[in-house]
Image (cartoon, rainbow, N blue to C red):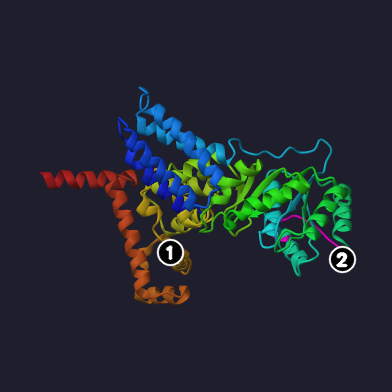
Amino acid sequence: MFETLGERLEGALSRIRGKTRLTQADVDEALAEIRRALLEADVNIGVVNLISERVGVAAVGAMTSPSLTPGQQVVKAVHNELIDVLGQDTYRIRFASTPPTILLLAGLQGSGKTTAAAKLALLLRRQGRSPYLIAADLARPGAVRQLEILGEQAGVPVFSEPTTPVEVATKGVAEARRLARDVVIIDTAGRLAIDDALMNEVSEIQKATQAHLRFLVVDAMIGQDAVVTARAFDERLELSAVILTKLDGDARGGAALSVKEVVGKPIAFASVGEKLEDFEPFYPDRMASRILGMGDVLSLIERAQDTMDEDVAKKGADRLRSGHFDLEDFLEQLRQVRRMGPLKGVLSMLPGVPKELKNQDIDEGEISRVEAIVSSMTKAERKNPSIIDVSRRARIASGSGTTQLQVNTLLKQFRDMNKMMRQMGVGPPSATRSRAKSKRKKRR
């Protein structure tokens, strides 16, 4: 979502980043470009003016500062302003001293509210909580069934009944207490636009359940309408925080850069993909770094810890160092990496990755084909690819839905990788010694 904004800001800052001396013309040009980039990203005009003013002050101070180079100071100022606008501190849920903690989710229809409820439940369950979902959206056909399916996938029970939204919410909270669940998440109905019926229903549910926290679920792709929606809901519910959905989309991202500064409510969580696991706390400092192309190593490490099997990863590393890395190991490691999400998203978290590589379209289908080819091999063939003859290649191609040429290409690439590792000195001690002896004989 922030790809275009990030590129424009990087372009504006790259021209002054390495300069040891700034002129007023340099500052004016950079500020004008930063302002254009923010406006094109659909950032609220008030927020644009605020960022421009503060960065301008920092830039003027940088012209005479002896510490960092002036260019670095301007980059730092832009980074700090993005953090301020996005929320400064990471939002933390304050759980009630007497369970359950009741969380109410509100928002317009189509914002991804029901899916966000299930994603939040899964996140809390993985943190050691025992969440309970209440399907109080009785207006949209299939909403209750959708939450039941998602709840089953998340391993979280769902309560609902064909009465009224207020009764469902009230009885659901009582049932959660009876079952000793410590967190309740209420999914409420939405409308295509803000109206009195929607606001009255959500307000009644809030009064009946005395929800401790009220989250507004906002589609990050709707731009400035996100700010209008947040203001309207805040007036009726006194919102606690905002959940941004569809942050993996290709919209301009202005909502995320506007809602905190304009409405005064922090962004608590962000949905960054379609899977239930693609939901995470919103870290303003990390997002600011990603927008400016500085990477987000901490989020990458946390994602790896959450999704990868440490024993499998260690085993693969040991096998690689010993020179015994085969296609069986390759398949295990490939599946580990794929669990971290789309590779393009992983690349965006790495600092220093060239823009051309970040913007490269990675064909996830090609990765699936590679996995299918290796999966179609027998264990013996994965352990020792040299036994794969013409007939075996034909069988593997048929089993994986690929061509023999694609099978040959994969085998060649794997051989080339092993050859490169041997040239780097990675391999069994005996093999390394024999290569060294061979080189000495040739020199003689």
In the image, residue 166 above or below residue 125: below
Residue type at the position of mark 2: Pro
In the image, residue 4 above or below residue 432: below
Residue designated by label 2: 162
Q: Quick check: can you spot residue 82? A: no
Q: In which quarter of the image is residue 363?
A: bottom left
What residue is drawn where x is 39% and y is 77%?
A: 394
The residue mark sitting in front, 2 or 1, is 2
Q: Quadrant of residue 142?
A: bottom right
- Label 2 sits on a secondary structure element that is loop
Which is more toward the observer, 370 or 443? Answer: 370
Q: Please give the label number shown on residue 363.
A: 1
Find the distance from the CA under tag 2 to the CA under tag 1: 45 Å
Q: Give the range drawn in magenta.
A: 152-163
Question: Where's the C terminus, which quadrant?
Answer: top left
- Label 1 sits on a secondary structure element that is loop
